[in-house]
Amino acid sequence: METASVQVQAPNSISSRPAGKPKIAYFSMEIGIDEHIPTYSGGLGILAGDTLKAAADLNVPIVAVTLLSEKGYFYQEIDPDGNQIERPYNFNINDFLKPLPSKTDVTIEGRPVNIRIWYYLVQGISGYIVPIFFLDTNLEENSAYDREITKYLYGGDTRYRLAQEIILGIGGIRAIHALGYTTIDKYHMNEGHAALGTLELYRRYQEVDKVREQCVFTTHTPVAAGHDQFDLTLVKSMIGDMLPQSLYPEVTFENRLNMTRLALFFSHYVNGVAKRHGEVSRLMFPGYAIDSITNGVHTATWVSEPFARVFDKYMPGWRSDPFLLRAAFSIDKNDIWAAHIEAKKKLVDFVNNRYNVGMNYDHFTIGFARRQTAYKRPELLISDPQRLMNIAEKAGPIQIIYAGKAHPKDGSGKESIRRIYSVMKSIKGKVKMTYIDNYDMAISKLMTSGVDIWLNTPRRPQEASGTSGMKAAHNGVPQFSTLDGWWIEGRIENITGWAIGTRKSNERESDDDADRDDLYTKLESWIMPKFYNDRDNWIRTMRSCIAINASFFNTNRMIQQYVLNAYFM
Ligand SMILES: *Cc1c(COP(=O)(O)O)cnc(C)c1O
């Protein structure tokens, strides 16, 4: 790849350079491309951003569409009792994005809603450019309600959400055409939010097969309740005949339009985001051929500075070809440890400066950060504080760093944060603990590279993939997790990390008590003794995480699978 000639392509309307020929249009409700652009909430958006970065690195002719979400998801503050406070982001759009002269519009509830298009250019490692288009309805000519549609990511009620999906799906397809792209032959929907775009294509072609041969759909949701659905009355009042009655039997259920079914019906290729998730999706939607392509993370984005230096020394070229990381087995163990300690110091200094918790560079540090919601069981680790304190006394000191936002309407997720705060106070002096507020890309990188072990505790089979453990693997940090999502593929016991739960229990749904017991037992008898008393072997495990997992669970490998299996078939 590195010897390929540098090829810079940009869309007609942006540059005077010869127009490229983008073939794929990628749609995602959220895209996390840069820590300063708050147009993402979590895993789905980061995956989209990492996908586009890898596409740019490999000269994959793709363009992307998302919503502007100018107030972001929300900025999280937490009060001393653990109550989450949500504030809007105020990000200065003009500092990061540029507006385009082309506009488009959609019809919502019979009135035209005008859409402005902003863009951001992702530049790949050899200069190739992938544009991201941000749709914006905050224009003077729109009504007060319509001006708000692209403000809050995942905010508002059902009507607001449907309006957003109209902008993203129908507006997104129209934007691609308004920008003059005539060579797109695949429309990739990253989750069902953009599924209404299929109706715009159907309006143009009037032929299901013609739409189908152009659509690719990636589902991310392994639970039925997680799929977007809208009452048909609402749909009809908002988009009128865009949804023809002839399609009702295929895409509606109990008088509701199901966005996943709509996307499934109109796509010739569908995939889940890990092998197990593919199986679960096939059971949930019998009759559809659902493949799986396991997620990855963008290597150059998530490797911390100290490890980047080590990789440069031993495996030059790893940024453009992360497969090279398999040679990590040859890295001197002292170099691995020195890089880890440097990354760990950065995290420990950060939490000590900000939260005054007096954490120690040498103490075993556990990280847990993700969306705070019931199925991820954020409190499993601290659910028996006495046992945790006993382990710290017997096996060695423990430090715990938490982070994560709860969706503003997720009461139980917010309750989790409060309970974590209350345990944090009650075990003070015995186990050092802190909760970093406003989890974002920057905090994620600091944490996944700076802790000694990355913990994940989802209830099977609800974690479609999970990607933060892949970021940890890129920094030699082993994962300790229930066997769900990507971890079923990535875990080799005691070599890349550890599983929570026995083989037997893994055939059933998760049992909190059994998982808690296994978590504590393994921590005390296997993991901490290895960390404190068998450092050489601990570093071997760190090295295997890089060689075995980082070399595979990256978006460079992932986008190649999309190209082969989804785009050019
Ligand atoms: C990587 C990342 C996620 C996704 O992590 P999961 O393991 O899938 O939960 C969520 N939020 C942020 C800010 C991230 O960087």
Image: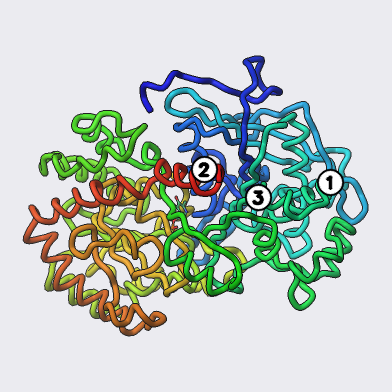
Residue type of the residue flagged with mark 3: Cys
- The residue positioned 86% from the left and 43% from the top of the image is 142
Kindly tell me whether residue 540 is visible in this rendering.
yes
How far is the residue under mark 1 from the one under mark 2?
26 Å
Badge 3 marks a residue whose secondary structure is strand
**Picture coordinates of residue 26 (x, y %)?**
61, 43
Kindly tell me whether residue 81 is visible in this rendering.
no
Q: Earlier in the sequence, mark 1 or mark 2?
A: 2
Horizontal side of residue 508 vs 106, given as left or right: left
* Of residues 52 and 442, the one drawn nearer to the viewer in this rendering: 52
- The residue positioned 44% from the left and 69% from the top of the image is 376
> Is residue 471 shown above or below 422?
above
**Picture coordinates of residue 431 (x, y %)?**
24, 67
The part of the image, by quadrant, that contains residue 178 is top right
Horizontal side of residue 240 vs 73, given as left or right: right
> Is residue 145 shown above or below 463?
above
Q: Which dot marks residue 49?
A: 2
Q: Which residue is mark 1?
A: 106
**Picture coordinates of residue 318 (x, y %)?**
30, 34
> Is residue 99 shown above or below 470?
above
The part of the image, by quadrant, that contains residue 1 is top left
Q: Which residue is mark 3?
A: 215
Badge 2 marks a residue whose secondary structure is helix
Horizontal side of residue 414 vs 445, given as left or right: right
Q: Are marks 3 and 1 in contact (CB under 8 Å)?
A: no
Q: How many marks?
A: 3
